[in-house]
Image (spheres, rainbow, N blue to C red):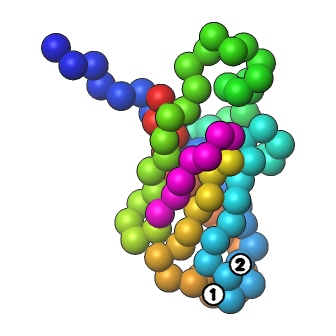
Amino acid sequence: MANLQKAIVIGCAVVADGTNSTFELDLLRDPYFISFHGNGFGEFPSDWFSDNLLRNQPVSVVADSPDSATLTDNVVTYTFGTTPAAGTLAVSFTLLF
């Protein structure tokens, strides 16, 4: 029997300039929130990468189509499918473990 893959939804805000369509989020240094089962967002509780090396670490990231995201070490690179208009945007993506 196969196990379901564990996932955590991450949320953050970015300020679009109307020209660029990519941003990076360093999961060790940048602020972001973790979704808690429909109860809104909570603060980042611990460090998956250096706090406890025995802890499961994220293995990949998924963005909603048409956007895309990649995970390299502890940095998520998020690319919008269409360049967003200037202004503040709420962004979410899913880390898979």
- Is residue 34 located in the magenta-colored stretch of the structure? no
Residue type marked 1:
Ala
The main secondary structure of the magenta stretch is strand
Local SS, label 2: strand
The residues colored magenta run 68-74
- Residue at image coords 42%, 27%: 6
Q: Name the residue under label 2.
A: 16
Which residue sits at x=53%, y=73%?
Answer: 80
- Mark 1 = which residue? 85
Residue shown at 61% from the left, 46% from the top: 72
Above or below, 10 against 66 in this view is above
CA gap, disc 2 and disc 1:
6 Å
Residue 78 x, y percent position in the rendering: 59, 62
Q: Based on the displayed image, in which of its 4 quarters is residue 48 positioned?
A: top right
Q: Earlier in the sequence, mark 2 or mark 1?
A: 2
Residue 23 sits above or below residue 39 on the image: below
- Amino acid type at circle 2 is Ala
